[in-house]
Image: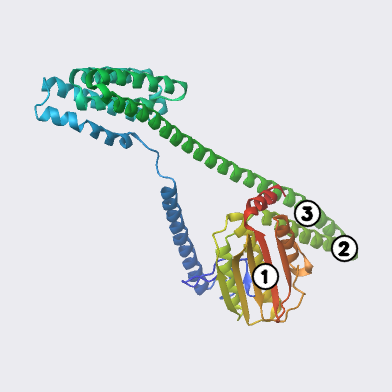
């Protein structure tokens, strides 16, 4: 696909579009000054594009996966003590200096506990338990001594206890703090103890549940990322193993037959030519096998293939018309439809003689539909041909097998109103199945 700065980027198979070789359009002799400038511009353009894509991906990950919560998330709850602080400032509390010291001590212990709660090692350390015990004693002393607004420190105590307590210890802790808050509040406020008890129990259990759920989500996310890395490593191992098996055997045969041809050439030229013919056959077979291995390894984006199709059709003197609608597709569906677009457009460019090609992607019921139609000759000669010699590994016949394995269907043939029509239907819900089948193949 030709970019804005005049360089060329690979959009498909090299044998699919005339004038394209190894992902480059023929344009300028290799090694010429213009070619070198174009290559340099292309390299810089690709580097800039790759950098932009990496920045966009990092920003998207930051939006989708915000950082884990920390102690700052629980600090705003200290505003519940503003009534007590106001009483101390306005002198409506007996022994204001002692009350102020108690308030400062409680806040310091609360901050220490909630920040330790988000680090597993610190949360489970004995020191955290002792800090929580000290916080409980200060809360009881302030509530017994002053009552009123000072009883609101019990829900804060429950919040701190819920932040550091997990597992079987949570229920006894929550019930014990609730009973303690209810007893002291009943002694000081009578029936007002009900709201204090309820607030203490609720803050303890809800805080523990929310933080436990948050930790579970983080663990699941880490597990998913680890599984993704493992899948990438397995795929790399599979691809390297396939290439080793394919090339190791093929190159060995080529070397042996080449040596035989060299020895036979001086005295028996027909036998040497037979060996050379075998070398050609082995090379062609190896090329087919490598293409099949790459087909299982390399996947593309449907948008990328559509862009490449526009470029290829325009270069071939055909008017491209691309329409896409419907919901976003997952990676397996996009990859499979991308292969269909690539092969159908390649055949249209090579065989149809058309002046217009329409590509439509939409949703039909529970299925995703792709149509590639041209106004050319409408011949069947291109069907199933992936290259010279009628190979079908990456042609429409091979694509029909892959679409069928994913639960869909692919049809290709002359259109009712002339031209050639390729139609693919793929169930959107079976895209993961297609990926599994491809990985097992």
Task: Pinpoint residue 183: horizontal percent, then vertical percent.
Answer: 30, 17
Which residue is outermost to the front?
191
Q: Give the mark toward the camera: 1 or 2.
A: 1
Residue 403 visible in the picture? yes
Which residue is outermost to the left?
91
Task: Pinpoint residue 382: horizontal percent, then vertical percent.
Answer: 74, 73
Q: CA distance from mark 1 to mark 2?
A: 37 Å
Q: Does residue 360 sit above or below 99 in this rendering?
A: below
Mark 1–mark 3 contact, CB under 8 Å? no
Task: Pinpoint residue 113: horizontal percent, then vertical percent.
Answer: 32, 26
Q: Which residue is mark 1?
A: 344
Q: Earlier in the sequence, mark 2 or mark 3?
A: 3
Residue at x-position 87% and y-position 63%:
274
Q: Secondary structure at mark 1?
A: helix
Residue in the foreground of this view, choosing between 195 and 362:
195
Q: Tell me the tag on residue 113.
A: none
Q: Secondary structure at mark 2?
A: helix
Q: Earlier in the sequence, mark 1 or mark 2?
A: 2
Q: Which residue is mark 2?
A: 274
Q: CA distance from mark 1 to mark 3?
A: 38 Å
Q: Tell me the tag on residue 255.
A: 3
Left or right of 132 in this view: 295 = right
Residue at x-position 72% and y-position 55%:
405
* Numbered disc total: 3
Task: Pinpoint residue 56: horizontal percent, then vertical percent.
Answer: 43, 56
Mark 2–mark 3 contact, CB under 8 Å? no
Instruction: Answer with the quarter of the image where residue 301 lies.
Output: bottom right
Left or right of 190 in this view: 241 = right
Q: Does residue 409 sit above or below 435 in this rendering?
A: below
Instruction: Answer with the quarter of the image where residue 133 lies.
Output: top left
């Amino acid at each position: 696909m030709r970019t804005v700065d005049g360089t060329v980027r690979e959009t498909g198979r090299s044998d699919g579009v005339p004038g394209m070789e190894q992902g480059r359009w023929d344009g300028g002799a290799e090694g010429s000054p213009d070619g070198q400038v174009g290559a340099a511009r292309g390299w810089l353009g690709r580097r800039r594009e790759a950098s932009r894509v990496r920045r966009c991906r990092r920003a998207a990950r930051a939006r989708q996966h915000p950082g884990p919560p920390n102690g700052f998330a629980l600090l705003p709850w200290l505003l519940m003590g503003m009534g007590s602080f106001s009483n101390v400032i306005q002198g409506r509390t007996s022994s204001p200096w002692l009350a102020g010291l108690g308030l400062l001590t409680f806040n310091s212990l609360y901050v220490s506990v909630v920040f330790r709660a988000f680090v597993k090692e610190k949360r489970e350390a004995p020191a955290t338990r002792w800090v929580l015990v000290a916080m409980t004693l200060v809360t009881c002393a302030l509530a017994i001594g002053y009552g009123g607004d000072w009883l609101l420190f019990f829900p804060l105590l429950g919040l701190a206890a819920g932040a550091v307590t997990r597992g079987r210890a949570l229920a006894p802790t929550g019930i014990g703090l609730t009973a303690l808050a209810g007893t002291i509040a009943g002694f000081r406020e009578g029936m007002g103890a009900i709201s204090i008890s309820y607030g203490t129990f609720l803050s303890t259990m809800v805080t523990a549940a929310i933080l436990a759920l948050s930790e579970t989500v983080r663990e699941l996310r880490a597990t998913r990322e680890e599984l993704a890395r493992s899948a990438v490593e397995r795929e790399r191992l599979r691809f390297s193993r396939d290439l080793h098996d394919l090339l190791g055997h093929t190159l060995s045969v080529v070397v042996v037959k080449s040596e035989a041809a060299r020895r036979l050439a001086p005295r028996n030229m027909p036998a040497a030519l037979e060996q050379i013919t075998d070398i050609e056959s082995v090379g062609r077979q190896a090329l087919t096998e490598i293409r099949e291995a790459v087909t299982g390894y390399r996947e593309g984006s449907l948008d990328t293939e559509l862009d490449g199709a526009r470029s290829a059709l325009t270069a071939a003197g055909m008017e491209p018309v691309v329409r896409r609608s419907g919901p976003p597709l997952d990676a397996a569906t996009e990859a499979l439809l991308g292969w269909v677009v690539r092969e159908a457009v390649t055949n249209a460019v090579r065989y149809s003689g058309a002046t217009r090609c329409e590509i439509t992607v939409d949703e039909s019921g529970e299925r995703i539909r792709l149509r590639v139609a041209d106004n050319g000759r409408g011949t069947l000669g291109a069907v199933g041909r992936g290259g010279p010699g009628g190979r079908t590994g990456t042609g429409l016949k091979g694509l029909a097998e892959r679409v069928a394995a994913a639960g869909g269907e692919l049809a290709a043939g002359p259109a009712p109103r002339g031209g050639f029509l390729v139609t693919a239907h793929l169930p959107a819900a079976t895209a993961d199945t297609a990926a599994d089948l491809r990985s097992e193949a």
